[in-house]
Image (cartoon, grey):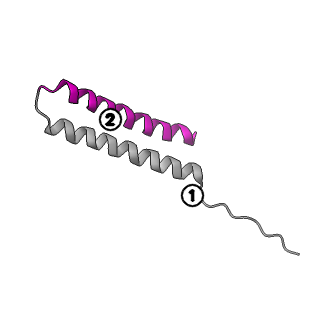
Amino acid sequence: MAQFRRTRSPLNSTAIVRIIAVGIGLVFLVLALRFAMEMPDVMPGNAAGILVLVFVGTVLILGAIWIGI
């Protein structure tokens, strides 16, 4: 009787989480860049918002890289 092997899909849950994290991180970085290009020179509250978007986007991208290791 022939044994059937279970083939592994290249898209497992880790890969899906990485793709989603990188996608969300890139969206946050693009939003921060777009917002920084459109805002006036003096806006301290909004500057903090930009820093938060950049921080969260970077953490998501680095987290996705770390998941793959």
Q: Position of residue 51 (x, y in %)?
A: 29, 29
Q: Residues within 10 Å of mark 2 (few under 14, many from 20)?
A: many
Examine the residues drawn in magenta and state their main secondary structure: helix
Q: Is residue 31 left or right of residue 12?
A: left
Q: Is residue 64 left or right of residue 57?
A: right
What number is the disc on residue 54?
none
Q: Is 48 contained in the magenta span? A: yes
What number is the disc on residue 11?
1
The quarter of the picture where the N terminus appears is: bottom right
- Amino acid marked by disc 2: Leu
- Picture quarter containing residue 37? top left
The quarter of the picture where the C terminus appears is: top right
Which residue in the structure is indicated by mark 2?
53
Question: Mark 1 or 2 closer to N-term?
Answer: 1
Q: Is 46 contained in the magenta span? A: yes
Give the answer, above or below, for where 22 lies relative to 8: above
Name the residue at the front extreme.
Answer: 45
- Amino acid marked by disc 1: Leu
- Picture quarter containing residue 40? top left
Give the answer, above or below, for where 16 lies relative to 69: below
Give the answer, above or below, for where 53 lies relative to 1: above
25 or 1: which is nearer to us? 25
Q: Residues within 10 Å of mark 1 (few under 14, many from 20)?
A: few
Viewer-nearest of discs 1 and 2: 2
| Residue at horizontal 32 percent and vertical 35 percent from the top | 53
Q: Which residues are magenta?
A: 42-69
Name the residue at the bottom extreme.
Answer: 1
